[in-house]
Amino acid sequence: MLRTPSDTGELFGHGGTVYAVARLLGVTPEELLDFSASINPLGPPAGVREAVMTAFDRVIHYPDPRAEALREALARRHGIAEENVCATNGSTELIHLLPRLVPGRRALVVAPPFSEYAAALEKGGWEIHYLFLAPEDGFTLSLAKLEERLADGFDLLILANPGNPTGALVPLPAVTELLELCRLSGTVPVIDEAFMDFCEEESAVPAVIADGRGLISRSLTKFFALPGLRLGYAVGAPAVIARLSGIVPPWSVGTLAQAAGVAALADAGYRDRTLDLIARQRELLSAGLAALPSLRPYPSAANYLLVQLTSGLSASTLRDRLLPHGILIRDCANFPGLDHRFFRVAVRGKEENSRLLAALAGLLGG
């Protein structure tokens, strides 16, 4: 087992901090089993490596500033026009552009939320309010409560669907109602679908384009296992996308990332294999967690599970006790709306999930 340092809390503001943790533990990143970042356990599609190597000779040129080939592939993927798509340097870049894109200063964020929403809005001088979803309700969004909150007057609404870190899915009919509530209240809706590839039939892409005011934020890094390349995109009505494209930094998406995205989107078999693997392993992992003492996993539509500790043990303590086993989990205490009892784990392959369950059983009993 690895030796655990005494002070690890500051390393875990986000998931996926494998480089910092590896340095602290005196090991290589490859020696760590990272359940804190929700990345496809299959790794990138086979064609991505060849596409990146082929494109490498083009790094002597500036990237295509409009990412035309990538936008064409994304438009084809969703059955929409290229003018409905804007490529970005990860979906996080889009989140940080929102304060400049949307006029106003008051935002309502459905919580518990991804931390970058608040980070971006605070830098832009926005006033942030939260609509908290309750664990006892399975983190289900109540449209009646949303309507009540929107009546207070907000310029922007941000909803992650599926929720991160909850994994809870707002079905498409409910999202359509949400768009109408935003229209009536004069609120711009932004729906973060970073993990929607795992349940694509519920995507609000057509509805948001038809609505004409809001945006869909998407990521290519989670489903296609490309977080090191930083690749995301926005979908919306042409006028909204045109405004967004006007504030995206020049050459935002690099040549290699563009090539990787096109190759990843072309691999239909990869998508089928991923959905089959995640559905089976998510069910097995959830059942395995539920069978252990003091753990309550919540249902999820994505490739991760939110888990509640029902004993006095805190998630940070459990995280630190797993580190000597070379296993990272995501302590969720810093998500608004959650506390020290919650942690998140990615759904990985069978052997990796079994290793996590065995380590947890050794620490918790069972």
Image: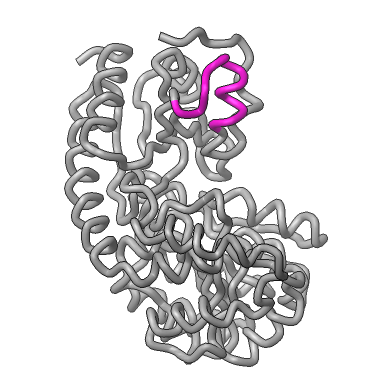
Q: Position of residue 297 (x, y in %)?
A: 29, 38
**Which is nearer the eye, 169 or 194?**
194
Spot occupied by residue 305 in the image (x, y as percentages of width and height) = 34, 42
- Residue at left 51%, top 67%? 259
Q: Is residue 282 left or right of residue 170?
A: left
Residue displayed at 60% across by 56% down: 130
Q: What segment carries the magenta color?
A: 18-30
Residue 5 coordinates in the image, percent (x, y): 58, 10
Q: Quadrant of the C terminus?
A: top left
Foreground residue among 90 and 336: 90
Question: In the shown orientation, is residue 98 left or right of residue 355?
Answer: right
Can you say whether 138 is above or below 332 in the image? below
> Looking at the rendering, in which quadrant would you find the N terminus?
top left
What is the quadrant of residue 152 in the picture?
Answer: bottom right
Q: Is residue 82 above or below residue 4?
A: below
In depth, the one of 126 and 33 nearer the eye is 33
Q: Main secondary structure of the magenta part?
A: helix
The percent position of residue 337, horizontal first and vertical second, equals: 53, 44
- Answer above or below: position of 137 versus 108: above
Query: Which is nearer the eye, 362 or 129?
Result: 362
Q: Above or below — where is 151 with respect to 51?
A: below
Q: Residue at x 69, y 79 (%)?
A: 244
